[in-house]
Image: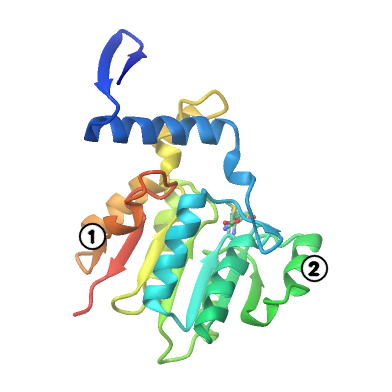
Amino acid sequence: MKIKLIQGDMEKEIDIYSAEGLSLMSDLWTKVSCHNRLMYEPTWLGIPIIQFPEDIVMMQELIWKVRPDVIVETGVAHGGSAVLYASILELIGRGRVIGVDVEIRKYNRIAINSHPLSKRIALIEGSSVAENIVAETRERIGKDDKVLVVLDSNHSYDHVLKEMELYSKMVSQDSYMVVMDGAQGLVWDIPNGKPEWKEDNPLKAINNFLSKHPEWEADSYYTRMHITSNPTGFLRRRAV
Ligand SMILES: C[S@@+](CC[C@H](N)C(=O)[O-])C[C@H]1O[C@@H](n2cnc3c(N)ncnc32)[C@H](O)[C@@H]1O
């Protein structure tokens, strides 16, 4: 079966069962899914989580493999992702989530704090790149804690690059920093997208960061489902 792609003046037929077809169909689904805001649909244990289902499954795999003592997440929103991470830690039997958000809305805070997994979640309100917030986050991490970081706050290039520089230092060797929403660079041209996303996106920050930090590598294992908002966003800190 073939699909005919017509984009501007370009017309091309692609076999949907080829590697190119898989890549194209995944990109097209990502665009259609974002256009229909499907990533706002899921909930995790009762709390809205803003993720693609495939990324939720990949985060579960990653946390189960790394078995971190601490997961630092920037960008909490309703708290569904913090509860997701806490729920996997609960199954492992130890670990906690530190969630940082510039604005933790009253009803989101109430929902998170009254959730059965709240015992594993601490919230810090403030900008993830503010000196005092970074310091407070660091203070809550023990010297020997195995740390995994998830960056999912402001998705502009400048902010993400700043966050990567600040939070990468907290990540343990052989653990990960997951940089979310690199797909912003893919969906800039959808009807409700923004032309500036083409250049201003987390993927560019990831590429810049990787070019300066050979101790980090992108792990494509966690993007093997193809549908992901985090292309090249699962970054492993090499053990040296
Ligand atoms: C995409 S949502 C996070 C989604 C959440 N991680 C999830 O999976 O459900 C982005 C969040 O980042 C927060 N945010 C925006 N700028 C920020 C900043 N400078 N520092 C910390 N959080 C920020 C917003 O308030 C918003 O709650």
- Residue 78 relative to residue 128: left or right: right
Q: Residue 104, located in which quarter of the rendered image?
A: bottom right
Q: Amino acid at mark 1?
A: Lys
Query: In front of the other: label 2 or label 1?
Result: 2
Q: How many numbered discs sit on the rendered protein?
A: 2
Q: CA distance from mark 2 to mark 1?
A: 41 Å
Above or below, 5 relative to 98: above
**Which residue lies under the disc numbered 2?**
110
Residue at 62% over, 63% down: 101
Q: Amino acid at mark 2?
A: Ile
- Residue 92 relative to residue 125: left or right: left
Residue at 50% over, 74% down: 71
Query: From the image, which quarter does the C terminus lie in?
Result: bottom left
Closest to the observer, 224 or 213: 224
**Which residue lies under the disc numbered 1?**
212
Disc 1 crowd, CA 10 A, few/some/many (<14, 14-19, 20+): few
